[in-house]
Image (cartoon, rainbow, N blue to C red):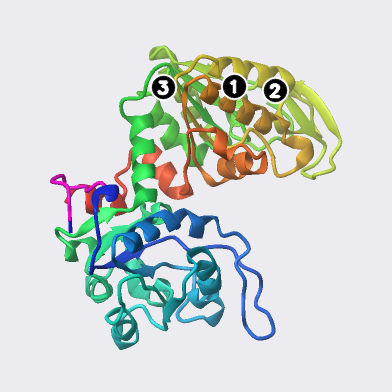
Amino acid sequence: METTPSAVMAFQDLTFEGVRALIRVDFNVPMTPPAEDGSRTVTDDTRIRAALPTIQHVLDTGGSVVLMSHLGRPKGADADLSLRHIISTLEGHLGRPVKFASDCVGDEALEVTQSLAAGEVAVLENLRFHGEEKAGDEFFAGQLAENGDFYINDAFGTAHRAHASTAVIAKFFPEDKAFGFLMEGEVKALEQVLGGAEKPVAAVIGGAKVSSKLAVLQNLLDRVDKLVIGGGMAYTFVQAQGGQVGGSLVEPDMHGDALALLEAAKAKGISVHLPTDTLCGDGFSPDANQQTHPTNAIPDGWEGMDIGPKSRADFAGALAGCKTILWNGPMGVFEFDRFAEGTNHIAQAIVQETAAGAYTLVGGGDSVAAVNKAGLADKVSYVSTGGGAMLEGLEGKTLPGIAAIAEA
């Protein structure tokens, strides 16, 4: 096997002739409810397709592939959450048969994985059928390691978990381990935004609650020139400054944190953009009546559902000319078409800046869903696959699944 001298080997430079590559993937995909015969069908294969380049590279360079993943949150073995249900979808993408091991450790697994020939692919049963996976059990990790000669982590969505298959297992492959293409891309995207990003740098942070994004906002203060805050969390900032926000979502216990963040941003010369007008609904409903009000003067009986026209223009103007843009979190209840325009407007603005040469990273489940819904995912620089992992990365935390390989 060819390797580079660095601790983190460039995946493209590796070859796998005669090697069983044990790949941690994220095949935790949505599926149909069980049919009468117990079968289920994958309804969104995005995560499976994301892993294909890594799998194909191993096969193209003469190796065999053993895939391991979790699915759902089982309490022990559960036929409805068996990875057996994803086999036909994977076979369709790979154009070859895929073997299945009825367990991920022990004789059932080894019988399948130790007999693989070059070009063959096998899937191990759901890792979380064993409580030792989430517990990060070292003995269990060692059992998993017996299924391969080389370990590849390509599951960014679980990189923030110190589980047996994502962090602990790496110690059993002191030299023979690497990130797959997906993980390489995620790590580079985070480094590009949090490391030596080209200025000016803007962060667009949305979502429902300040409490869930406070650490992200605080970590970004040393890295951004502009901070755009939208979504439900904006109303806590507005109320903390004395505004009236009607029935909008607020966290009164976060007022102090919100004001402290605004003061810290001011001290660092960061321009903070909060919505000045809000598209309101008279209830949390897709067909609620609509009125636009100043964000600091929303009457009782109305709640903020989206940023208003003036805010859309202000936010887009703040992004104009930026060289690096991070987007995490929608601007409103974009799931309701009548309240999706603000989020879509920001998506379009980010696409426009991407076309002008900016590096743009979209991360977090709702933001990704928004760009996918708008059909714009291929028009930004990078779309992250990991919600929780991306958030913890943006908070500045060390991700166990990355550290296990990068800090070897």
Q: Is residue 326 left or right of residue 307?
A: left
Q: Mark 1 is on which residue type? A: Leu
**Residue 163 visible within the image:** no
Percent position (x, y) of residue 197? 36, 24
Q: Which mark is residue 327?
A: none
Q: Give the residue at mark 2.
A: 295
Q: Nearer the viewer, residue 408 or 217?
A: 408
Q: Residues within 10 Å of mark 3 (few under 14, many from 20)?
A: many
Q: Are marks 1 and 2 in contact (CB under 8 Å)?
A: yes
Q: Main secondary structure of the magenta part?
A: loop
Residue at x-position 61% and y-position 24%: 349
Q: Is residue 379 left or right of residue 6?
A: right
Q: Give the residue at mark 1.
A: 274
Q: Give the residue at mark 3.
A: 224
The relative height of residue 311 versus residue 333 in the rendered view (above or below) is above
Q: Locate residue 334: give its quadrant.
A: top right
The relative height of residue 257 versus residue 171 in the rendered view (above or below) is above
Residue at x-position 39% and y-position 13%: 267
The relative height of residue 18 versus residue 8 in the rendered view (above or below) is below
Mark 2 falls on what kind of element? loop
Q: Mark 2 is on which residue type? A: Thr
Percent position (x, y) of residue 304? 72, 32
- Callout in the foreground (1, 3): 3
Q: Earlier in the sequence, mark 3 or mark 2?
A: 3
Q: Residues within 10 Å of mark 2 (few under 14, many from 20)?
A: many
